[in-house]
Amino acid sequence: MKTISEILAQELGKKQEHIENVIALIDEGNTIPFIARYRKEMHGSMDDTMLRNLETRLNYLRNLQASEYIQDQAYHH
């Protein structure tokens, strides 16, 4: 099973390293405008739109993963 960063890298056509860097920056509480403007070396110069798409898909995939985990736990109990 692919990781979320692998899925996002494939969907967005970006290096997995850059995707993982952006995920870490988002998880640290950095805003998309800040990441776009001041962390270009970490994300391969993705623009604001690409970064927002990444953030949206990240949230969706994390929520999906959480609901699958909950369903799996309910099934096994």
Image (cartoon, rainbow, N blue to C red):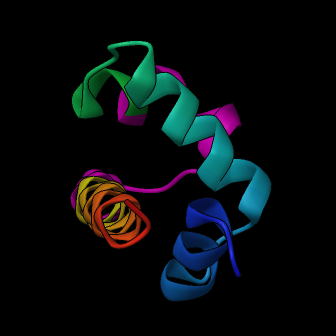
Q: Is residue 74 above or below residue 34?
A: below
Asked whether 60 or 53 is in front, the reply is 60
Question: Which quarter shows the N terminus?
Answer: bottom right
What percent of the width, then of the height, locates residue 50? Answer: 34, 64
Q: Is residue 16 above or below residue 75?
A: above
Left/right of residue 63 with respect to residue 35 in the rendered view: left
Number of labels in the image equals 0
What percent of the width, then of the height, locates residue 7? Answer: 57, 78
Asked whether 71 or 28 is in front, the reply is 71
What percent of the width, then of the height, locates residue 16? Answer: 74, 62
Q: Which residues are magenta?
A: 36-56
Q: Residue at x 23, y 64 (%)?
A: 60
Magenta stretch holds residue 18: no
Left/right of residue 7 with respect to residue 17 in the rendered view: left
Asked whether 46 or 23 is in front, the reply is 23
Quarter of the view holding residue 4: bottom right
Quarter of the view holding residue 57: bottom left
Main secondary-structure element of the magenta-colored stretch = helix
Question: Which quarter shows the C terminus?
Answer: bottom left
Query: Farthest residue in the front direction?
Result: 77
Left/right of residue 36 with respect to residue 22 in the rendered view: left
Task: Kindly tell me whether residue 34 is visible in this rendering.
Answer: yes
Q: Is residue 16 above or below residue 2?
A: above
Q: Residue at x 34, y 53 (%)?
A: 51
Task: Kindly tell me whether residue 44 is visible in this rendering.
Answer: no
Q: Residue at x 61, y 45 (%)?
A: 43
Q: Residue at x 56, y 28 (%)?
A: 24
What percent of the width, then of the height, locates residue 10? Answer: 62, 85
